[in-house]
Image (cartoon, rainbow, N blue to C red):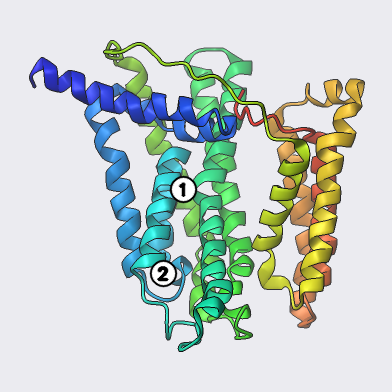
Amino acid sequence: MPLADASTVDTLARLFWRRIPAAAARVSEALRTVLRDGDYLLAWPAAAVLVPPLVLLSGLLLGAVHPGPVFSSSLTVLLLFAIVGGLGASLGLVAALGYALGDLLLHGHEGLGYVSGVSRIGSVFRTDLALVNTYVILAGLLVVTPIVATSVRRQIQTRVRSGRPGFFLGWLVGGLVQALLAYFWAQSAAFMIRPIWSFWNSSPDIGSINPLQQGALWIALVTLLAIAGRAVVTMKANQRPRPPRSQPYVRFSMRRPWPWQARVALRSALFTLLLAGLFSSVLEAAAVFVVLAGLGVLQYRVVPEMGPYVAIVNRIPLLIRVGACGVVGFLMAALVVQPAINRGSASFISMVVAMIPPLLLAAFVLPKPSGRLGR
């Protein structure tokens, strides 16, 4: 390859994996972390340039041609997304964006769980909003689970500091964490995608629910295998010399973080949207928003003021703190939610009762998230 072409490829690779994340940090440090999760591809500049658009096109294609009204209608689609999520949060975000565009603009939804012949306003508030909800849920698998696992892996590798053993231990624990999160994501997504039907007062399509519930173990296993492949590729990348920069890094001035009130409000609104399938009235949604906002105030404002306590809590490894919240959430689901489902009773009260203890614990053991994941 001519030198000029090699220089162009290197410039494009660093544009996607370095300059764009650096610019994104002006909006959100967490977004910068997501966009750089997968930069092991920089060891092969051509792959670093080609893989993201290929993943985007693949997501677009899956969004356009997937069967049923939602991504969960096909276990094959779910497993393909699990592979992408195992390769990194950045590629997961690209795949989620591609899927959202393909599903929203190219996929036919009438007759697949929706009511046809409705007004545009009704379609926006009942169909399009429900679709956006599914895209956020999908991002949970493709973006949130890999970035949490990356944070755990880096903390372990930083603490162990023993060369190759620390490298493998970090990947082993991080991979298991992501696989476990993928399993729980599948179980919870089966409930969270219900606005597709509940916004129209319809019953959920069992064919779109079963792949999540019955294929949860497969999703976790495929995620783990994809992470193992990523670990091998990362090890190979670490052994390769990185190409010299054709241009110096560009540093962007950082904006001040959003006010904590705005972060609490946005997070509460997002989680309320994710739980929309469990609500039978606007009043129930408002009650959940208030509860989530109260827990957010506790996490962002009250607990961080307990200086000595926060210093002690932050000494506990992140994996243990996150794991404790996950265990409490699992126990509440097993002791409260599942029995209510088995009885056939309404799920709203049981879901609210089950979600408060793990979120309350998170407020005390994960105070004031800084957005600097994995550091």
> Element type at marker 1?
helix
Residue 276 placed where, x, y %?
A: 68, 68
Q: Earlier in the sequence, mark 1 or mark 2?
A: 2
Pick the quarter of the image with the C terminus.
top right
Residue 73 in view in this figure: yes
Farthest residue toward the left? Answer: 2
Residue type beneath disc 2: Ser
Residue contact between numbered discs 1 and 2, judged by CB atoms under 8 Å: no
Q: Is residue 294 left or right of residue 320?
A: right
Marks 1/2: CA–CA distance? 16 Å
Residue 81 placed where, x, y %?
A: 42, 54
For the point 28% across and 10% down, the residue is 244
Q: Nearer the viewer, residue 189 or 257?
A: 257
For the point 58% across and 68% down, the residue is 193
Front label number (1 vs 2): 2
> Element type at marker 2?
loop
Task: Give the vertical position of 209 relative to 2 (above or below).
Answer: below
Pick the quarter of the image with the N terminus.
top left
Instruction: Please name the residue that numbered disc 2 is placed on.
Output: 74
Residue 335 in view in this figure: no
Residue 92 placed where, x, y %?
A: 44, 45
Which label is found at residue 102? none
| Quadrant hosting residue 284 | bottom right
Which label is found at residue 223? 1
For the point 51% across and 45% down, the residue is 143
